Amino acid sequence: MFTHEDLWNAIEILARNNNMTCSGLARASGLDPTTFNKSKRASKYGQPRWLSMETIAKVLSATHTTPDDFANMFPQKPCPER
């Protein structure tokens, strides 16, 4: 289980690990340079904006990162009890 914040932290880690800014990561992935701006991480109503699988796939491809390596950028948390 991961949070919206965990996902955005992983994007920032991926950018840093590839010696890029978040803007540079977006450009390298063929995305608008403002895609990963902090101002775009929530809607104007404060709802979290989640990245699409297509966007994540582009980022992983551009950085030659496997899905497993990307998943390892998330903090390890136990599954919640039901």
Image: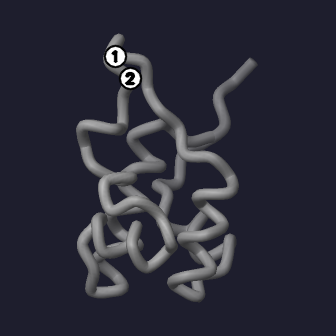
* Looking at the image, residue 28 lies above or below residue 9: below
What residue sits right under mark 1 in the picture?
46
Q: Which amino acid does label 1 sit on?
A: Gly
**Residue at position x 50%, y 72% in the image:** 30
Q: Which residue is drawn at 60% across and 60% down?
A: 56
Given the image, on which type of amino acid does mark 2 rest?
Ser
Find the residue positioned furthest to the top. 45
Q: Is mark 1 on a helix, strand or loop?
A: loop
Give the quarter of the image for residue 32. bottom left
User: By what rule are the colours in the image chosen?
Assistant: one colour
Residue 10 higher or lower than 14, as above or below: above
Relative placement, left or right, of 12 versus 82 is left
Front-lying residue, 54 or 65: 54
Is residue 44 or residue 19 the one in the foreground?
Answer: 44
Looking at the image, residue 45 sits to the left or right of residue 70; the answer is left
3D distance between C-alphas at marks 1 and 2: 5 Å
Q: Where is residue 61 in the image (x, y as percent from the top left)?
A: 62, 80
Q: Residue at x 31, y 54 (%)?
A: 34
- Residue at the outermost right position: 82
| Above or below for 21 versus 42 | below
Image quadrant assignment for residue 71: bottom right
Q: Pointer 1: residues within 10 angstroms few (<14), some, or many (20+)? A: few
Residue 25: % across, % down: 38, 73
> Could you say whether the residue bearing mark 2 is in a helix, strand or loop?
loop
Q: Which of 82 and 55 is in front in this view?
A: 55
User: Which disc number belongs to residue 21?
Assistant: none
Which of the image's four quarters has the N terminus?
A: top right
Quarter of the figure that contains the C terminus: top right
Q: Where is residue 11 in the image (x, y as percent from the top left)?
A: 41, 61
Asked if the residue at tag 2 contacts the one at tag 1, i.e. Cβ–Cβ closer than 8 Å, the answer is yes
Q: Residue 43 carries which label?
A: 2
